[in-house]
């Protein structure tokens, strides 16, 4: 599966304090490694991504290291939990995300 980083999301706020914390809380994890295949770095960011080649245009949060989060183009990802970047489905109160689609991708 491949994803593409969504541009222009740096100013979006989340009630969890960071988008990585958003992912950790909603994925039920305590720590995260970068989701990009071939990368073994510890995740530092919660990256806003969209699926490549899918009709699903929802935005999701995936843990990534800073270098991968800043990468342009398509990124192959490991099997990982996709978390919606959407307050309507997550119930976390991330007000900046209220209009985004809410479905979870099928592998």
Image (tube, grey):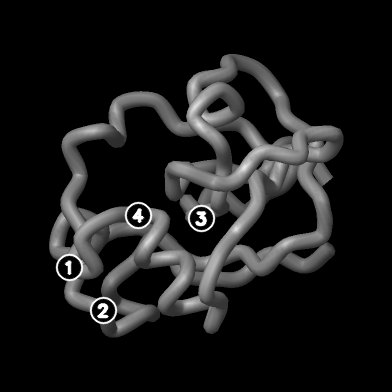
For mark 1, give the secondary structure. loop
Q: Earlier in the sequence, mark 1 or mark 3?
A: 1
Q: Give the foreground label among 1 and 3.
A: 1
Quote the CA–CA distance across marks 4 and 2.
Answer: 11 Å
**Dot in front, 4 or 2:** 4
Residue in front for this viewpoint, 13 or 33 = 33
In the image, is residue 39 above or below residue 45?
above
Q: Which secondary structure, mark 2?
A: loop
Q: First in sequence: mark 2 or mark 1?
A: 1
Disc 2 crowd rating (10 Å Cα; few below 14, some 14-19, many 20+) is: some
The tag on residue 19 is 4
Alpha carbon distance from label 2 to label 3: 14 Å
Count residues near mark 4 (Cα–Cα under 10 Å), then give few for <14, some for 14-19, many for 20+. Answer: many
Question: What's the mark number on residue 92?
Answer: 2
What residue is pinned by disc 3? 60
**Which residue is nearer to you in this view: 2 or 68?**
68
Q: Nearer the viewer, mark 3 or mark 4?
A: 4
Element under disc 3? strand
Q: Which of the 4 image quarters holds residue 40? A: top right
Q: For the residues marked 2 and 1, what is the alpha-carbon distance in whole angstroms?
A: 7 Å
Mark 1: give few (<14), some (14-19) or many (20+) Cα within 10 Å: some
- Residue 15, numbered label: 1
Q: Earlier in the sequence, mark 3 or mark 4?
A: 4
CA distance separating discs 3 and 4? 10 Å
| Disc 2 + disc 1, Cβ < 8 Å | yes
**Residue 12, image x, y percentages:** 20, 44
């Amino acid at each position: 599966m491949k994803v593409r980083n969504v541009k222009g999301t740096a100013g979006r706020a989340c009630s969890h304090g960071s988008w990585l914390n958003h992912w950790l809380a909603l994925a039920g994890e305590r720590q995260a490694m970068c989701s990009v295949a071939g990368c073994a770095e510890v995740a530092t960011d919660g990256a806003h991504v969209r699926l490549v080649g899918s009709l699903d245009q929802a935005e999701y949060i995936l843990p990534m290291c800073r270098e991968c989060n800043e990468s342009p183009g398509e990124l192959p990802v490991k099997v990982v939990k996709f978390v919606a970047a959407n307050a309507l489905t997550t119930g976390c109160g991330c007000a900046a995300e209220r209009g985004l689609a809410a479905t979870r991708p099928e592998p």
